[in-house]
Amino acid sequence: MPKTEHWQWYAEEFAPTERHEHAVEELLAAGRSQFQQYAVLRTPVFGKMLVLDGDTQSSQGDERIYHESLVHPAMAAADALSEVLILGGGEGATLREALRHPGVARCTMVDIDGEVVELCKRHLPEWGAGAWDDPRARVIIGDALRFLREDHDRYDVIISDLTEPLPDSPSWPLFNGAVFRDIKARLSEGGVYVLQASTAAFHNMALHVKMARTLRNYFTYVRSYFAYVPAFDTAWAFLACSDAVDVQALSGERIARHVAELRGENFYYDEETHRRLFALPLYLRRALAEKGEVFS
């Protein structure tokens, strides 16, 4: 009897020669917003999954691996946490993680796709876990590029949870020198800019390396790190950037203090995990050291 007989399957095309497949128990929602296609699926292994333009964004089973890795190294490193800015993050989980720290006085989230934000509130309430209703949350439905140009506030931590800067992506205009200068202008002294930065396996690291190479032209410290996210079935990378602090070099005591101050328990990130996140394999260290193409 074929193993696939009782399932429908969601096939994510990672590349022309690579596909990842997930069995589907239920299709909870599907459609197209002004900006992208969306679907919310229920799967037997990972629970609910958010899919945008055919790409898995997060899953109920392991989204905390991704979101804790994105948010907490930067927040542990920053001199202050009063003002946090999130670019993207429509699921609400990045907002949730930032607001777990009592030192955050205000967390501003800017996402262009209000329809997907409402979809996530309705179908993925576990991701936000009450963050949408936190009085410290300021959620703006709008263009992150315009926000960066028009906003005059300063932020202790800026978190970019946007899609990868590919030519067919809405995030493409947000990855260039003018935007990085705007981000630096919004960053407080002692602040940290962190972003999701594509994949870091031996066969799919080219975009991450190009992103890191570009950001080194704008920040004193640019550190790559990654976590294996099972729902993505690959190593997912991030970049921590600052002129004031080397996020990789944080002491275990500082990380442990940050984690202890968070509301609720972490699933993934602590001082030991921090060391693992920044322990890059030789192939990636070699690639990051090479000269090559950058974003203009």
Image (cartoon, grey):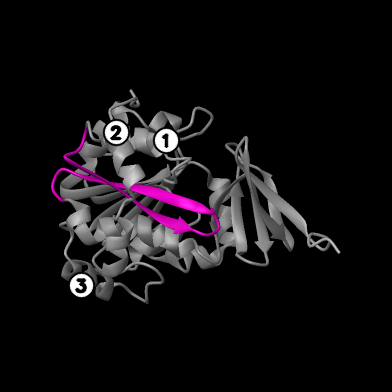
N-terminal of the pair, mark 3 or mark 2, is 2
Q: Position of residue 168 (x, y in %)?
A: 54, 29
The correct choice, above or below, for 269 with respect to 277 in the image is below
**Depth order, front residue of 170/276:** 276
> Mark 3 = which residue?
257
> Mark 2 = which residue?
213
Q: How many marks?
A: 3
Q: Position of residue 34 (x, y in %)?
A: 60, 37
The amino acid sitting under disc 3 is Arg
Q: CA distance from mark 3 to mark 1?
A: 34 Å
User: How dense is the environment of label 1, judged by Cα within 10 Å: few (below 14), some, or many (20 and up)?
Assistant: some
Q: The magenta stretch spans which residues?
A: 218-245
**Most prominent secondary structure in the magenta stretch?**
strand
Single out the mark in the foreground, 3 or 1. Answer: 1
Q: CA distance from mark 3 to mark 2?
A: 32 Å
> Mark 1 = which residue?
207
Secondary structure at numbered mark 1: helix
Contact, mark 3 vs mark 1 (Cβ under 8 Å): no
**Depth order, front residue of 44/137:** 44
Q: CA distance from mark 2 to mark 1?
A: 10 Å
The amino acid sitting under disc 1 is Leu
Residue positioned most to the front? 282
Residue 279 on the magenta span: no
